[in-house]
Amino acid sequence: MSAIATWIGDYTGLDAHKRTLLGIGSFLLPLLIWCLVSYVPYVWHPKVLVTDPGGVDYFQVGSLVDKSMFASEVANMEKQHLAIPAGRPANPIYLPEPLEVAKALYTGLTRTPQQSDTPSMPASLWHSIQVIFWGFLISSVIGVPLGILSGTYAPVGRLNEPFVEFFRYLPAPAFGALAVAILGIYDGPKIAIIVIGTLFQQVLIIANTTRKLEATIIEAAKTLGTKSLRLLTRVVVPGILPDLYRDQRILLGWAWTYLIVAELIGTSTGITWYITQQARYQHFENVYAGIVIIGIIGFGTDLILAQVGRRLFPWDRTLDRS
Amino acid sequence: MESDLPSYRDQSEAVKARFERIKQREVILEVRKLGKRFRGPQGEVEALRDINFSVHRREFLCVIGPSGCGKSTLIRILAGLESQTSGDALLDGKPIKGPGQDRGMVFQGYSLFPWLTVKKNVMFGPQMNGQGRDEAERDALLWLELVGLQKFANAYPHQLSGGMRQRVAIARALVNQPRILLMDEPFGALDAQTRAKMQSHLIDIWRNVDITVLFITHDLDEAIYLADRILVLKAHPGEVQELIEVPVLRPRSPAQLASPEFFATKARLEELIHPGQEPEPEDEQSVKPHMIRLTNVADNVE
């Protein structure tokens, strides 16, 4: 077997060294493809960036023109014995180069915007984070206790879950107009959409997690004289805590994906506003930067929470495998 | 069977006297006409039928039988985790109505609370009882010392080996001073060496503490080594086959595994549990392995 095959053919689990390398590789690979498409002129590049308009009156420096049209104009100019336009191969405007996006990310985060009344990227981002925070908090305050009770007591579960299962299939954005009518146009409907999108999944997932608690532990607690309410608070809740934490982490990621949709309801605010504005002005490097920053924050938060979880729950063996 | 082997019913004078003494003590657990039926996937199943026996104070009773004979159902009914459909189970004369600290239980799987340290696990029972933190801690540390784990008081269960975890489980049950200790195949998941150590450890505890033990196992040697009496159940439905008084002298030592009384008892148990002449039930026959020769004819291992 070749060296690479032996190296990557390990199905039984990876050691830390390999894990880090493959994890970094997971990001490098798409980045490499992106660089390839952006910087190597022979890959794709269907348009031409005009550097010298020559004799063509509608060409401007910096405009993007189709290759075929550019070629026909060059032929035209040659026939008319006028200056020949010059240009270099380029990608369409909606695929900026990685370096441009990186620069846009940097300037977006550090410099203040040109118009003083429009919020900057960090301010938009902060607004979005607040909306997510409140949405997730309200959903958890209702969803976590309901989920635990549904999982522990069969009648409660049976009363709740059929309706919750049904409601889960109603798409949250469909409630947009209703939410605006009830809660106004500012942050209210956005938080409501996040709650609607997250809550019903939350109840079902947490009820399921609660049910998976080892029956032996509950029975052992019973034989030690634990009665009903204490069974819930001193045995069930501590018992499911590592899995509850992991579920909440996953659900936070879920709520995060509802962000863009939620922020389009009512007045546009937050990072979604920033992205749609920049798209309108055709500054796609800023659009990419906005999307990337959302990803970085969501992913980074998840990584931090995972590490914290590993410290908080040393007895949970499943965390070692993730 | 050779004629010079004693019958399992022959008891030496010392053993007879001992059983007389046991029968003088009060009855802690009485089971009368206990029955359990439930609705299974293929109609009604009778797990237990007409179980009758009683256990005296400080007796060591083993329950043994083939799989499916209802041993676990029986011990769960005695622990109060399930209820019977007919008959009575009485502890100190009072009917059993649900789980409680008076019947301590040790499970086969690991039933320790993983989020609590070993010491806090043992403190759990006394705290449920209303004892203050300091008192509970004192009792817990005492029992941890008795089972030899005081060094691991602040360790977590996932850091201990299987034998150690079961010792903690025993301490956790005994700290509440139960009337009877119910053990559902507690050493089944341990390797042979650890199991032997745990058996002597259990006998040591039983010898020095006022505790009655009801112990479920499927290991015949273990049952004879540990028990005063052995309750043999049969399967489908679970019924009492025989209640054997073990003629092996106490204190028991590994050397007695070769004694004639031991052999006689074991032979009797094997007769009861694996009669050998029964035709295999149909579902066993359909899953019988059907091996064919896959290796070279000349390549033999035996």
Image (tube, coloured by chain):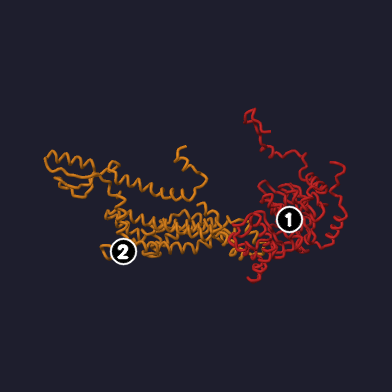
Chain colours: A orange, B red
Secondary element at tag 1 = helix
Task: Identify the residue at horizontal 46%, vertical 43% (top origin).
Answer: A7
Whole-percent x and y of residue B130?
A: 65, 70
Please give the residue where the numbered disc 2 appears in the rendered image: A119
On the picture, is B15 further left or further right than B143? Answer: right
Whole-percent x and y of residue A239?
A: 58, 60
Please give the residue where the numbered disc 1 appears in the rendered image: B200
Q: Nearer the viewer, residue B149 or A158?
A: B149
On the picture, is A60 further left or further right than B109? Answer: left
Query: What subunit carries mark 2?
Result: A
Secondary element at tag 2 = loop
Q: Is residue A267 visible?
A: no
In the rendered view, tell whether residue A2 sits above or below residue B112: above
Residue A298, located in which quarter of the rendered image? bottom left
- The amino acid pointed to by label 2 is Pro
Q: Nearer the viewer, mark 1 or mark 2?
A: 1
Q: Nearer the viewer, residue A15 or B48?
A: A15
Task: Identify the residue at horizontal 13%, vertical 43% (top origin).
Answer: A83
- The amino acid pointed to by label 1 is Ser
Structural distance between the alpha carbons of marks 1 and 2? 76 Å
Whole-percent x and y of residue A218?
A: 63, 59
Whole-percent x and y of residue B105?
A: 69, 59
